Amino acid sequence: MKHGKKYVDSAKLIDRTKLYDADEALALCVKTSTAKFDETVEVHVKLGVDSRHADQQVRGAIVLPNGTGKTVRVVAICKGDNVKAAEAAGADHVGAEELVQKIQSEGWVDFDVLITTPDMMGLVGRLGKVLGPRGLMPNPKAGTVAMDIGKAITDAKAGKIEYRLDKTNIIHCAIGKASFGAEKLQVNFDALLGAIIKAKPAAAKGQYIKSCVVATTMGPGVRMNPNKVGGQE
């Protein structure tokens, strides 16, 4: 793959043979962000688990202390008193059958998060084929199926992210924008890694965090020392 001049120049600042400490890696990430837009900073964590086994799944959600730097569009599917609570919390669209119909028949997915209450899951369950492939299906573990819909919406707007393993046992998460600077990114990074370590399955054997790479949207990856992230030292 041929890279542009900016990428090549940025890559020269990174020692490919070195495993960086988190603070140094995040500072490099900010330094190598050269795009004309505010790049997202992403973390890729490979875990020593096997996602094919139900007892080795790693999944959850966390509100990043400094948010994500992104405006989150929230749809709330609810009824009764929950409608007012959802509107008060700042949901962009609130409804029930009519929203389900719109998503189902029109394939409307112009939102980032869908939040609902447990009593509505029978209705929302019909949307699996549309929402599932896009990672938008509500789930209690991600906090998107909640009794307190107002709090769930507030958390989503504040920068709540979901982390989950892919088929190659890697978690991919955005932890903010390059404009945050290394210190704010470090706080978000520590919060995410802390949550992932806390979610370690009892069935996981050997080294839990195998590798950790941080990169901006357009920039090169910076490899971190897996033994020194998330307080593992």
Image: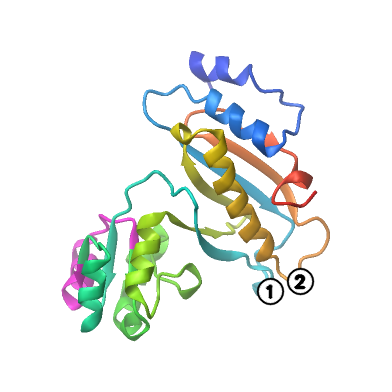
Identify the colour scheme used: rainbow
Q: Residue furthest left?
A: 98
Q: Is residue 29 above or below residue 186?
A: above
Left or right for 107, reference 229: left
Residue 136 in view of the camera: yes
Seen at 65% across and 64% down, the residue is 51
Q: Label 2 belongs to which residue?
A: 203
Q: Residue furthest right?
A: 206
Direction from residue 33 to residue 121 in the image, left or right: left
Query: At 64% across and 18% down in the image, what residue appears?
Result: 13
The three-letter amino acid code for the residue at tag 2 is Ala
Q: Which mark is residue 55?
A: 1
What numbered label is drawn on residue 173? none
- Mark 1 vs 2, N-terminal side: 1
Q: What amino acid is at disc 1?
A: Asp
SS class of the residue under badge 2? loop
Is residue 185 shown above or below 168? above
Q: Can you give x and y, in whole percent of width and height, for residue 182 in the image?
A: 56, 34
Which image quadrant for residue 112? bottom left
Marks 1/2 in contact by CB < 8 Å: the verdict is: yes
Residue range of the region highlighted in magenta in the rendering: 94-113
- If the image is split into quadrants, where does the N terminus sit? top right
